[in-house]
């Protein structure tokens, strides 16, 4: 990987910190739909530590180049999330309540991944990098839609966030490509993992918010899913995946309907009952 | 001692060394044993992500203050590694990502089992386990800051001293966070105090132990904390750590040194 093109040290040196002083759209009046979308994006851009808690328990954490990048990436995402909150009026979205079962799943996530990592090994790095390619592509599409809806000053700020995101995506795209090209096993694992989760990352925590965000996206950009799928499927071994098309059809839920779907639905039903009692 | 996470995050910057005259190291190079210690410190700073991992498998990552701190702390520590790598680079010692990766690979099965162990404990013990991590972090950061301070005193080098003081100043901010979090959580729970005392007294070791080779840990501890001045620093560290609720009377630093056959006067 040392021959890779993305210069992690230059990226780290030039990281985007707090944007508060350079934002021009803070305080600009925005309509409720855009505020809702910005708050949703704020949640998705934040929350990196939860994803990192799943990634760092796997062999991905041994790759110093990846972890060096992720140190800076998490820092940038923190400040991007902060900027989105400021543009949305400074008031965060009301947290979606998490019941006992949901919390238990979240809490046990790192343990599950740590155990699974001993089976899958290095192939998980391909999964993690691809996850961020998919996530970043969708977040960029949502940001682009927000730009179209926003007054000029806010749109200008959002365009800057897109530029920061674009640079991050260069790393994920390059690394995902390299890792997927290494082995068919990594490709198969990545296909299964990408289809098994909801998009963007964290969407399952707010299915209703995800549905609203994707509805706004589809209203202004009906071809987004096919366009993003084409980009994602250009990665080695991911042809025909259709993850965005599936996400558009079923927002906030895992992309693939598998034979285990009824069992999963039953589990969710049981969870909702327990959660209501909790 | 209040800790404002927003102020901390806003003030979080990479440590700077561009204004320092690194050519001073060409005119007045550091001795071999100091370079060996600096290499250890550099590696440990780069390995911060391994400590981050251990913390993130506990319920701590759902706490927004902890999450923000971890994000800033991890990046600052990465830059400490880069700064020390720049000093080593002037001496012809190159630290590349692949070398750091190689040292992480050497940890082997312990590294695979640690997150499982930590996660199991975190889930069994619950939120009280965060108090242990915060105390552990406070002790680590205090010992790191003391190490930099001792190296300043030992070398008194015109380029090294200002750099290490800048790093130590950032470590002090980290100590403030960990100590504030630990105190708050330990004061709130007798179970956390009992667990923390047990873990800290039985398992705490100098920062870097468990990741770095044992002979390197011994070298650094001997280099930095030998003699009357070193012993004074060890005693001071123990006094500070023992100020946390439930840790009264513990001497974990001195104990760790004695276990390694080092003399604490």
Image: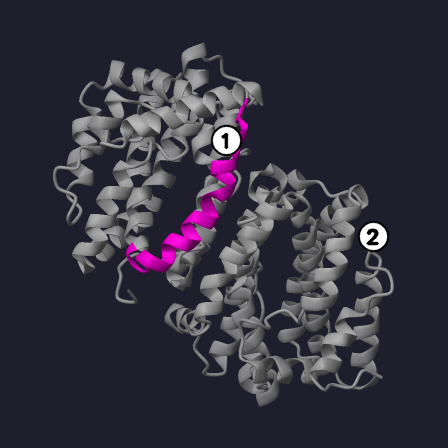
Residue at left 53%, top 49%?
B57
Residue located farthest toward the bottom when viewing the structure as drawn: B32
Expressed as whole percent of the image width and height from the top left, the position of residue B60 reads 60, 44
Expressed as whole percent of the image width and height from the top left, the position of residue B1 reads 81, 46
User: On the rendered structure, is A154 left or right of B148?
Assistant: left
User: On the rendered structure, is A208 left or right of B260?
Assistant: left
Q: Chain of mark 1?
A: A
Residue A162's quadrant in the figure?
top left
Residue at left 47%, top 48%?
A110
Residue located farthest toward the left when viewing the structure as drawn: A240
Magenta residues: mostly which secondary structure?
helix
Q: Which residue is mark 2?
A: B245
Vertically, is B124 above or below B37? above
Q: Observer-nearest residue: A223 or A238?
A: A238
Residue at left 26%, top 48%?
A173
Few, some or many residues within 10 Å of mark 1 (<14, 14–19, 20+): some
Q: Which residues are magenta?
A: A95-123
Q: Is residue A135 visible?
A: yes
Expressed as whole percent of the image width and height from the top left, the position of residue A250 reads 28, 22
Q: Which residue is mark 1?
A: A101
Q: Chain of mark 2?
A: B
């Amino acid at each position: 990987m040392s021959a890779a093109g993305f210069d992690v040290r230059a990226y780290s040196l030039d990281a985007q910190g707090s944007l508060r002083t350079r934002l021009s759209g803070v305080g600009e009046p925005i309509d409720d739909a855009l505020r809702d979308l910005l708050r949703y994006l704020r949640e998705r851009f934040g929350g990196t530590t939860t994803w990192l808690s799943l990634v760092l328990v796997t062999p991905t954490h041994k790759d110093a180049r990846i972890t060096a990048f992720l140190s800076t990436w998490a820092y940038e995402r923190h400040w991007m999330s902060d900027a989105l909150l400021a543009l949305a009026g400074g008031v965060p979205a009301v947290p979606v309540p998490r019941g006992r079962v949901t919390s238990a799943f979240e809490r046990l996530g790192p343990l599950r991944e740590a155990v699974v990592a001993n089976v899958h090994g290095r192939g998980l790095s391909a999964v993690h990098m691809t996850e961020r390619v998919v996530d970043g592509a969708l977040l960029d599409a949502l940001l682009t839609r927000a730009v179209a809806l926003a007054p000029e000053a806010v749109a200008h700020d959002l365009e800057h966030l897109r530029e920061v995101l674009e640079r991050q995506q260069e790393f994920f795209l390059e690394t995902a490509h390299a890792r997927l090209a290494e082995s068919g096993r990594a490709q198969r694992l990545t296909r299964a993992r990408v289809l098994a989760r909801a998009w963007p990352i964290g969407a399952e925590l707010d299915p209703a918010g995800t549905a609203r965000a994707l509805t706004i996206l589809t209203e202004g950009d009906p071809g987004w899913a096919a366009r993003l799928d084409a980009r994602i499927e250009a990665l080695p071994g991911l042809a025909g995946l259709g993850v965005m098309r599936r996400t558009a059809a079923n927002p906030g839920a895992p992309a693939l309907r598998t034979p285990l779907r009824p069992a999963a639905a039953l589990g969710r039903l049981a969870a909702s009952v327990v959660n209501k009692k909790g | 001692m209040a800790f404002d996470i927003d102020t901390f995050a806003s003030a979080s910057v990479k440590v700077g060394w561009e204004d320092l005259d690194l050519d001073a190291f060409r005119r007045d190079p550091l001795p071999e044993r100091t370079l060996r210690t600096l290499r250890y410190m550099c590696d440990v700073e780069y390995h911060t992500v391994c400590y981050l991992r251990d913390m993130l498998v506990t319920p701590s990552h759902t706490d927004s203050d902890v999450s923000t701190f971890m994000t800033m702390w991890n990046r600052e520590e990465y830059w400490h590694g880069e700064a020390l790598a720049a000093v080593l680079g002037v001496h012809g010692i190159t630290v590349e990502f692949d070398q750091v990766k190689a040292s992480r690979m050497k940890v082997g099965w312990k590294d695979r089992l640690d997150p499982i162990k930590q996660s199991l404990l975190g889930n069994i013990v619950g939120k009280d386990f965060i108090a242990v991590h915060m105390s552990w972090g406070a002790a680590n950061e205090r010992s790191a800051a003391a190490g930099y301070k001792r190296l300043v005193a030992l070398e008194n080098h015109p380029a090294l001293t200002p750099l290490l003081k800048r790093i130590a100043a950032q470590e002090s901010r980290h100590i403030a966070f960990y100590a504030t979090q630990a105190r708050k959580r330990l004061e709130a729970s007798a179970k956390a105090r009992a667990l923390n005392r047990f873990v800290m007294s039985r398992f705490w070791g100098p920062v870097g132990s468990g990741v770095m080779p044992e002979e390197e840990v011994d070298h650094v501890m001997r280099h930095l904390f030998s003699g009357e001045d070193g012993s004074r620093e060890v005693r001071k560290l123990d006094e500070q750590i023992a100020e946390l609720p439930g840790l009264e009377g513990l001497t974990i630093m001195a104990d760790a040194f004695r276990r390694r056959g080092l003399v604490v006067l």
